[in-house]
Amino acid sequence: MTTHQNQNQLFVGSFIYSKNLDELEYLHGAAICVDKEGKIVAVERDCDEQTAIETVFPGLGWSADEVVVSVTKDGQFFFPGFIDTHLHASQYPNVGIFGKSTLLDWLNTYTFPLEASLADPLKARKVYSRVIRKTLSHGTTCAAYYATVDVPSTNLLADLCLAAGQRALVGRVCMDQLSPAYYRDDSPAASLAATRASIAHIEKADPGMRLVRPVITPRFAPSCSAPLMRALGDLAKEMPHLSVQTHISENAGEIALVRELFPMESTGAADDSYAAVYDAFGLLTDRTILAHAVHLSEAEADLIKTRGAKVSHCPCSNSAITSGAARVRWLLGKGIVCGLGTDMSGGYSPSVLEAARLAALVSRHVAMGGDEKAKLSVEEVLYLATKGGAEVVGLEGRVGGFEEDGEEDGNVDVFGWESWGDMVAKWVYNGDDRNTKKVWVKGRLVHERK
Ligand SMILES: O=c1[nH]c(=O)c2nc[nH]c2[nH]1
Ligand SMILES: [Zn+2]
């Protein structure tokens, strides 16, 4: 595959992207110029290839013979890359394998043994290479990954993302309690040292955090002792350029466990809620990504809004391991920023488009529970999958550009009489990786469907 890296590029045709939560912008007959560094340097409406060559290129100092041109055909469109705001790269081999488990037994039965086994570098390379290739093929240009406790293989995940050209947040998993002895940090100090080592590696591998960045990753409160939680909260304060990712309020058993492990008298938290525990340790900040947020109380959601923390909605995982139906409309109504996560392998699908579809369906289940306003529209779930996600991972304004286009073969039957709005709805409800023909990140072609 020619990647067109370090070449000026012209994209011509139809562009569709989220203007805001409620509206998609449809630009037909438009042109976008992307320079050698992968930056969008011109967006022109009512512009075809010839017009761009004659009127736009001179201002950019480009000559037509050195520019790579991509043009959409009928029914195709450029769409911003998807942002997967929460997934476990290390759990990819287990997608679909969850039986009838729920969170806590699922972790012990399926998840910890697999994650521990990735300390084998050959196995880690195989799994991480495949998860990157697979998510790129579904149009995921940016992913917030959990790796494992193991430092070398976590670092390898970052290196592989960098080599493949996928934007990524890569987190070494911190956990020093309540998992088998073969899979946990030896002490809070060891966990902190290993985390620092992984951060140092990733920052050295990509000094300007151009594509890949480390993320502070307390697995979830039950996996972390109070001293470890405090150390990671202090680390987040020391490194304000880094995000924090964790899980919150996914499952009833987990919530009861947090209450038992972190009584408010021991933490100095304002109340005995899950969100207050993270807050007490300095882990609830405007750089915090909270996966799930299914069973939050009113007060917890208000606290999350006050701190500016973000939510990764994971409808596939929440359904597969029967955690519950997150009330996304309620979170959005409070002004909490939300994006979508596949949460493999709690979730079984690598596709953010599938997560968008399931977000729409789960919102209808919430509506059937009595809140008619809960239903999310096609426009809303696509916003969560792109611009909302960008804000969740702290890359707003940097991603959400035009990085992907759709193709006519595959599972979406287009008859020719549909409006563009109807075509997009058909893509959301029936599309898959066959509709993703090419994927670009920073101008580099990182996936091409043959
Ligand atoms: O969906 C989840 N996946 C996990 O790996 C995990 N660990 C803690 N809590 C979790 N939830
Ligand atoms: Zn998860």
Image (tube, rainbow, N blue to C red):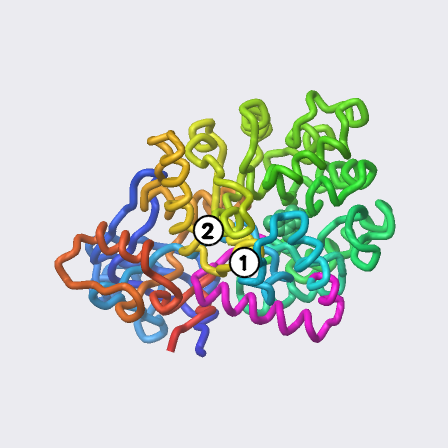
> Residue 98 is drawn in which quadrant?
bottom right
**Dot 1 lies on which element?**
strand
* Residue 288 seen in this snapshot: no
Q: Mark 1 packing: few (<14 Cα in 10 Å), some, or many (20+)? A: many
Residue 273 is situated, as x and y percent measured from the top left of the image, at: 66, 27
| Magenta highlight on residue 132 | yes
Q: Is residue 408 left or right of residue 185?
A: left
**Does residue 254 lie above or below 404 as drawn?**
above
| Of the image marks 1 and 2, the number of the one nearer the N terminus | 1
- Residue 399's tag is 2
- Residue 63's tag is none
Q: Mark 2 packing: few (<14 Cα in 10 Å), some, or many (20+)? A: many
Residue 366 is situated, as x and y percent measured from the top left of the image, at: 41, 36
* Residue 42 seen in this snapshot: yes
Residue 344 is situated, as x and y percent measured from the top left of the image, at: 56, 57
Q: Residues in magenta?
A: 115-144
Closest to the observer: 251 or 17? 251
Closest to the observer: 89 or 233? 89
Q: Which residue is mark 1?
A: 167
> Residue 206 is drawn in which quadrant?
bottom right
Amino acid type of disc 1?
Answer: Arg
Q: Is residue 145 left or right of residue 435?
A: right
